[in-house]
Each structure stands twice: as structure tokens, then as C-alpha cells.
Image (spheres, rainbow, N blue to C red):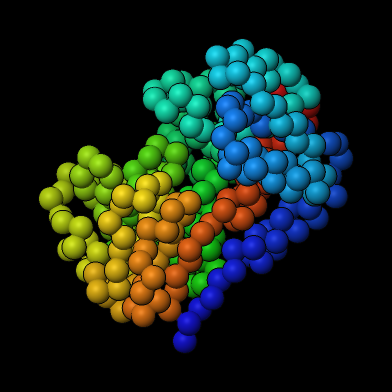
Amino acid sequence: MELNLNPNLLASRYIEQTKTQLDAMQGKIQVVGLIAGDDKPSIAYARATQQKFDDIGIRYDLRNVPRLELESHILEINEDPNIHGVFIYFPIFNNQQDDYLRNLVDFRKDIEAGSTYWTRKLYKNDRLAIRGDHDKKALLPCTPLAIVKMLTEIGVYEMRKPMPLENKTTTIFNRSEVIGRPLAVMMSNDGSRVYSFDVNGPMVFEAAVASETNISRADALAQSDIIITGVPSDRFDKIYAAEIKPGTVCVNFSSFQNFADDINTHTDIYIPRVGPMTVAMCMRNTLRLYENFHQAGES
């Protein structure tokens, strides 16, 4: 039986939960989105995100600034007690300068949880935002978290178990520091053997530890119970039904379709996009930042 998961419907449910929590809170949350450049799809996505935040009562100030002024804007936001979170729409420079800007954001305002403070906690499987404070939970990166929530919804991620992905093998095509690698760490922490591919070749993650491997794409795909793709290029060799075993769960988070059209002949679970859930998880992270660091007047 085919399991159809509508990302919009699931995202709406999480957004409604966040709105209910916001309505019960005192105070107003304000976030800033920083975008540089005039890429029309990026601007459209930023404006759509702004509208969704505004709709539930989070004030979202979208600022289009020259990329060489981003550093000063981030520093000003870090010092402003009236701003509780910040987005940066990457890529900006498409090099290590982007990592510098990402880590310049105060971790207490880092909605996307992409700075070293949060990634270090993820890699150590530290679930607390502040050491010793069990009431404050750590943030997880928005897109990896969105994927986990979607897999949980369809019963693939069995959260009732101590190791929700025990005895499962996953292959991920993307090892970026903001999505692919954090996702590999999260899933391996939860019991999966994760094969991770990018232009530099394969790695295998087990219990959050990466090791070298010579496994081929074909062998990794044939072994996998879950395949997740996020290759932002139409030059990627699409994954065909003949390459995977029947029943494999397939998820695509790239703006390009990384799976061939025949993929549905080999799986009952194919999720072609996760964008709406990513926005919902960003809202969830925004609320968690506010509760953890700002609600009591902390900055």
C-alpha cells in the first residue's frame, strides 16, 4: 500500500502547534532574515518564509543587504536584545566566508542551528542547550530535523525504541556541513549505518563517527533501507528503481529531482520535497531559542 505524505499538511500541523504555544506566551518574538543578492528564487523563498512567520505572530524583518555588509549586520543583531533570532540565506560567497558568517551568529539567536556551538553538541549527542539544565533542549538543524520528523510520521523512525533506526542502513547523497553531515550524525546516533556520498567520495557513519570506506554507489544503494538525496545539480546521475531494493524509503530535499520517474515502482514511500517542513522546524527552533535564552530577559 502506498504511503503518501503531504509535506504541506504535516507542516501545517507543526505550525499550528507552534502558534498555540505562542498564543499562550507573554512577549513578542522578533527575528531578522538577511539576504544578499537578487536571485529571484531565493527572494521568493525568503518572502514566503516571512509571510508564514508573520501569520503566526512572529515578527519577521527581511533585510536585503550588500554581502560585504553582512558581517556588520550580524554583529549588530547579536547585540540587540530586541531581536531573538536570525536567518541568513546562503550561499553568499559560496566559499569559506559563508562558514565564517554562519559562525559569527550568536548561538542564542541561531535559528538554523548551523553554528559550531550547536553542531558540536549534535556530534557529541548532547541533547541539552546548556550543560546541566535539563529544562532547556538543544536545537537541531532545520532541514535534517524536518526529514527526521517526516520519517517519524510514516513510522520509519521508531521513536518508541531506544535506537529508532537500529539495524537499518541509510545512504545520503550530500555531505554539507549544514544538512548532509548533521543528518548522517543524527541518524547514526539513532542506530543506522549511514553511507555518505559527496564529490570527495564515500564515508560511513556509525554512532556519529565517520570512517573511510570504498563502498560503491551501487552497493550502498542495494543495501539501503533509506535513501536521502540533496544534490543541487541536474548533472547528478539520477537514482533509478533498478538500483534499489523493493520497499526502500526515498527522500529528496534538493530543488532538483535526484530520483528518476520510475522510483515509485520500487517503493511505497517517496517524499519528493521537504521545504514546508523545514520552515515549520525553523519556527519550532525560533520558539525554543526564545524559551531557552530570551523569555526571562536573558540576552
Who is closer to the viewer here, 48 or 118?
48
The residue sitting at 39% across, 70% down in the picture is 261
Residue 292: name its quadrant: top right
Q: Quadrant of residue 268?
A: bottom left
Q: Quadrant of residue 26?
A: top right
- Please, which residue is most extreme toward the bottom here? 1
How far from the left and from the top, in percent, is residue 100?
46, 21
* 142 to 1, vertically: above or below: above
Q: Is residue 82 visible?
A: yes
- Percent position (x, y) of residue 284? 66, 48
| 222 lies left or right of 286 | left
> Residue 216 in the image: x percent, y percent?
16, 56
Instruction: Report x, y in % for residue 157.
Output: 46, 66
| Left or right of residue 122, residue 207 in this image | left
- Residue 82, above or below 205: above
25 vs 2, left or right, is: right
Compared with residue 57, is residue 66 higher up or lower down, i.e. above or below?
above
Relative depth, front residue between 7 and 65: 65
The answer to whether any part of residue 167 appears in the image is: no
Q: Quarter holding the C terminus?
A: top right
* Residue drawn at point x = 51 percent, y = 72 percent: 154
Q: Is residue 61 left or right of residue 120?
A: right
Residue placed at 12% from the left, 50% from the top? 214
- From what the image shows, is residue 7 above or below residue 194? below
